[in-house]
């Protein structure tokens, strides 16, 4: 389409037009039953449209009158992409950053993906948008594009499984959606109309769509955290599945049912390189598999456009745009979102340095556990392999002196805190108490190794010393450093220890240090150094290759695992290239430095084993390499699973839980809740079942 002379949202601000002007108009019905668009002082007859529709229009002719409303005619125009068109228009779409409206520049990558969406959506087939960077807020421009798309012309459903840990709860969505607005006139931010005033947000109640606000439009953005809401819902013209941050374990089955129930409704699934893939065992942080045949991905041409601007693009994170605040005398130059800047990071990856921690006594005992794991791995031995492997990984990744670690856990336990990580004594007791057919335990060598490791690491921890030295060096250089710890709770313990024991000034730590876990590390601001303690799960290897990092350092006692780290890095980058469709020479694999010549014995265990699916068939013997936590007294694993269902379905009813759990009556549900989960649920003002804060926290921590 040619560049129009002006662009309007038809409103009280637009009363005079020139043939060739474009506008976004709300169709109404005239007294004669014909479609019209009313503006401030003008009436336009349009060639099509039902009352409540919002259409792009081109003014065909226009005349002013001395008395009464000005008059004209307009035609509905098909437009490829609203965001692409906004590049040619005079700041047609705006974004509320800090306390002012700025042009909503989503960067070259998103503009291309949104243009591809606008082209492919007309086929009404399920499709995937593969974002090459991690920005959970990128779901909102997709929603805006579909709400404005003439082929959709109706309600858009948005499923987002957000939590307190994963951006995407309904409140997050509404807050970000409110930041978008459309210009009422062509001359700037003084006349921006917030998008919820054009298309309100809505929700599902008793199988019916309801809106939060009343607007003349009959189109809204319907939000839900439960896919069941959409299965039998009428009135959705498109559905977005937001998997940028999180993909739940049962989403695939729900999506299959959703697409079967809505065969003629376009389904758009959004994913990222660091989507949390929840599954049996530990989650993985990587692109999802099983994508649709229709893929919208960045092209090599867009990649060239990004790399060609390398010198002028700064690395960003998801809140860079909302926090942008230009100086009064500065020309507006808002930053690109991470969907573009992360791609730039992947084209020039950080070096990965595997650094051996010199502590031969510790290394020897870990190697003994490593060998013991192999001994029990392929035999049915009452969970022996799992217990030995978890003990090995605990000490391999321990990032602070054991005395401090155990004391802090015990302090929290005495204060009433639950679902805490295991102490070292509990790992030891599991090995000591191992039984076979009621006989004595046979994990004597493993038990002695753990006893020795406890002695070596009780008052000092070489891994902690390496972290402190890295932080100190970064502070001296004025650089920032992020230290990865796989558990939120243990990360809190490490952070406390660094402030108490490192000797580095607290104000400098505030300025230069971040302690992150697998969820929070994905959206960190750019840092010079990212530190990992020990080998991580294969499903976490994508985090080694973080695009916002200058250098990744992996400290390890176990030099025989170095080759495994490189294998995991190679596999992670291969998944990224398959996901984005970009060639090897444009997306190189990071160099891995510091590799030892030591290799595992030919018969030694592969540390990637716990996440693989070809292990022992008996779940009790399958090592899971999990950050094990203790369930509260009286709460079983089944109770936890049902509490997870309650949180997922909330607000819910006895009948819904009855069907979910396969019980025979609502009375049976009531009795179960009262007996087993009384501390973890309550009834809201509508007498629906919802989790207490305590229950939600427990599920969040366990997941």
Image: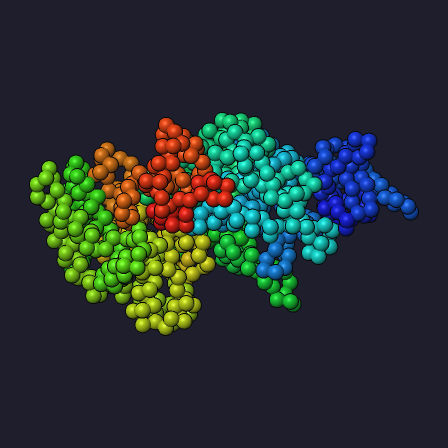
Closest to the observer: 684 or 578? 684
Q: Name the residue rendered at 56%, 56% in the picture.
A: 321
Closest to the observer: 117 or 564? 117
> Where's residue 160, x and y in %?
49, 42
> Where's residue 600, x and y in %?
20, 47
> Where's residue 491, x and y in %?
34, 58
Closest to the observer: 286 or 643? 643
Q: Name the residue rendered at 41%, 59% in the picture.
A: 550
Closest to the observer: 691 or 582? 691
Is residue 658 among what the camera can see? no
Q: Is residue 690 left or right of residue 591?
A: right
Q: Is residue 450 left or right of residue 663?
A: left
Placement of the C terminus among the 4 image quadrants: top left
Residue 402 placement: quadrant: bottom left
Q: Name the residue rendered at 60%, 50% in the picture.
A: 178
Q: Is residue 8 left or right of residue 138?
A: right
603, above or below 399, in the image:
above
């Amino acid at each position: 389409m040619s560049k129009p002379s002006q662009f309007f949202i038809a409103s009280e601000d637009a009363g005079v037009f020139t043939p060739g002007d474009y506008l976004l108009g709300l169709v109404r019905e005239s007294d004669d039953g014909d479609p019209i668009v009313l503006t401030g002082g003008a009436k336009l007859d349009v060639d099509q449209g039902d009352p409540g529709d919002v259409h792009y229009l081109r003014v065909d002719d226009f005349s002013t009158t001395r008395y009464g409303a000005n008059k004209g005619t307009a035609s509905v125009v098909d437009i490829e992409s609203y965001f692409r068109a906004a590049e040619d228009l005079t700041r047609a779409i705006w974004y509320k950053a800090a306390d002012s409206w700025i042009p909503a520049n989503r960067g070259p990558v998103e503009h291309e993906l949104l243009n591809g969406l606008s082209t492919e959506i007309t086929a009404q087939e399920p499709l995937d948008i593969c974002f090459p960077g991690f920005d959970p807020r990128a779901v909102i421009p997709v929603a805006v594009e579909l709400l404005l798309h003439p082929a959709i012309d109706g309600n858009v459903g948005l499923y987002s499984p957000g939590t307190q840990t994963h951006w995407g709860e309904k409140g997050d969505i509404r807050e970000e959606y409110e930041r978008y607005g459309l210009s009422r006139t062509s001359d700037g931010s003084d006349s921006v109309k917030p998008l919820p005033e054009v298309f309100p947000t809505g929700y599902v109640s008793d199988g019916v769509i309801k809106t939060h606000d009343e607007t003349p439009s009959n189109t809204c953005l319907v939000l839900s955290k439960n896919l069941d809401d959409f299965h039998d819902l009428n009135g959705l013209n498109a559905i977005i599945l937001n998997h940028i941050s999180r993909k739940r374990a049962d989403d695939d089955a729900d999506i299959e049912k959703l697409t079967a129930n809505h065969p003629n409704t376009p389904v758009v699934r959004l994913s990222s390189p660091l989507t949390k893939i929840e599954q049996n065992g530990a989650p993985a942080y990587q692109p999802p598999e099983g994508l649709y045949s229709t893929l919208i991905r960045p092209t090599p041409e867009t990649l060239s456009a990004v790399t060609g601007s390398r010198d002028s693009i700064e690395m960003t994170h998801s809140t860079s745009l909302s926090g942008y605040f230009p100086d009064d005398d500065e020309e507006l130059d808002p930053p690109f979102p991470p969907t573009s800047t992360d791609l730039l990071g992947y084209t020039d990856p950080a070096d990965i340095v595997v650094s051996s921690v010199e502590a031969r006594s510790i290394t020897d005992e870990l190697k003994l556990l490593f060998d013991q794991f192999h001994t029990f791995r392929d035999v049915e031995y009452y969970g022996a392999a799992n217990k030995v492997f978890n003990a090995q990984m605990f000490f391999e990744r321990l990032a602070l002196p054991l005395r401090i670690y155990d004391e802090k856990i015990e302090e929290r336990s005495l204060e009433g805190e639950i679902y805490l990580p295991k102490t070292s004594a509990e790992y030891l007791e599991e090995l000591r108490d191992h039984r076979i057919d009621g006989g004595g335990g046979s994990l004597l060598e493993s038990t002695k190794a753990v006893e020795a490791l406890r002695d070596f690491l009780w008052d000092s921890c070489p891994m902690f010393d390496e972290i402190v030295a890295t932080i100190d060096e970064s502070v001296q250089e004025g650089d920032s450093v992020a230290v990865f710890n796989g558990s939120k709770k243990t990360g809190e313990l490490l952070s406390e220890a660094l402030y108490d024991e490192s000797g580095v000034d607290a104000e400098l730590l505030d300025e230069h240090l971040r302690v992150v876990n697998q969820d929070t590390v994905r959206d960190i601001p750019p840092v010079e150094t990212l530190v990992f303690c020990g080998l991580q799960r294969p499903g976490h290897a994508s985090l080694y290759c973080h695009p916002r990092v200058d250098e990744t350092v992996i400290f390890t006692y176990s030099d025989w695992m170095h080759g495994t780290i490189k294998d995991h890095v190679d596999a992670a980058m291969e998944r990224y290239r398959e996901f984005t469709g970009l060639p090897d020479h444009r997306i190189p694999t990071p160099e891995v430095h510091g590799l030892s010549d030591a290799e595992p014995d030919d018969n030694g265990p592969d540390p990637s084993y716990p996440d693989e699916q070809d292990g022992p068939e008996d779940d009790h013997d399958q090592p899971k390499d999990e950050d094990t936590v203790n369930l509260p007294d009286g709460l079983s694993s089944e109770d936890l699973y049902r509490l997870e269902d309650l949180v997922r379905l909330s607000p819910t009813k006895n009948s819904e839980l009855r069907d979910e759990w396969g019980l025979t009556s609502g009375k049976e549900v009531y009795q179960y809740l009262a007996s087993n989960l009384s501390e973890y649920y309550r009834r809201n003002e509508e007498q629906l079942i919802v989790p207490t804060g305590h229950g939600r926290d427990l599920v969040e921590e366990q997941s």
